[in-house]
Image (spheres, rainbow, N blue to C red):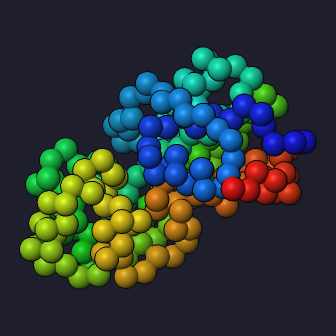
Amino acid sequence: MIFPADLLLASGSPRRRQLLASLGWPFRVVVPSVDEAFFPGENPEEGCLRLSGAKAEAVACLFPGSWIIAADTVVLLDGEVLGKPESREESRSMILRLGGRTHEVLTGVTLLSPSGKRQEGERTEVTFRPLTPADAARYAATGEGDDKAGAYGIQGLGSLLVSSIRGDYFNVVGLPLCRLGQMFESLGCPLSEQWRHEA
């Protein structure tokens, strides 16, 4: 099978858009209108998969027959979901809690195609260097983490917070690319076709 002629990214995230563009794949962005809140007591992995699926289905209703990529990413610390901060103070508090500790970044990915649907999850462990309250406050004040789960971005200024990762770096940014490529392959688009659209 050749590479999909009509590929849609169901996400408003500029990080996901940049990651997908780095592969040289032709795609369009369609931002879905979906409530991204977890259900009370919902398992984080199940919640990420459910939300990514809801985003993909919302776009599929508008563009039937297209290939659609959707994802949902959360940060987990001691099993607690750390979402996007609602204020700089909450951002500061999150960063301080993460300092000197290891947390998990979990992404649920959904790929819809005319021939089927795949949903998979990816986990990456991230360890922060020890931080002082002043460090956390200064990073929060940069605003980089305002729209990000866990209140930080590993690909920017937040790279100075991270002492190590175990797993897929791109998952921490917001889209596990290797996992996505394997999902494409499982739906009939082999790796050799994915490279044909190299930038």
Residue depicted at x 81% and y 53%: 196
**Is residue 158 shown left or right of residue 169?**
left
Left or right, residue 97 beside residue 174: left
**Residue 36 in the image, given as x and y percentages of width and height:** 39, 35
Q: What is the x, y in percent for residue 136?
A: 16, 69
* Residue lying farthest to the front in this orientation: 199
The residue located at (48%, 45%) in the rendering is 72
Tell me residue 59's x, y (percent).
57, 25
Q: Residue at x 37, y 82 (%)?
A: 163
Residue 178, relative to residue 7: is it above or below?
below
Q: Is residue 197 above or below residue 35?
A: below
Q: How many marks?
A: 0
Residue 59 horizontal side relative to residue 75, left or right: right
**Residue 50 makes an appearance in the image:** no
Looking at the picture, tell me which residue is in the foreground, 56 or 141: 141
Please say if 31 is above or below 62.
Answer: below
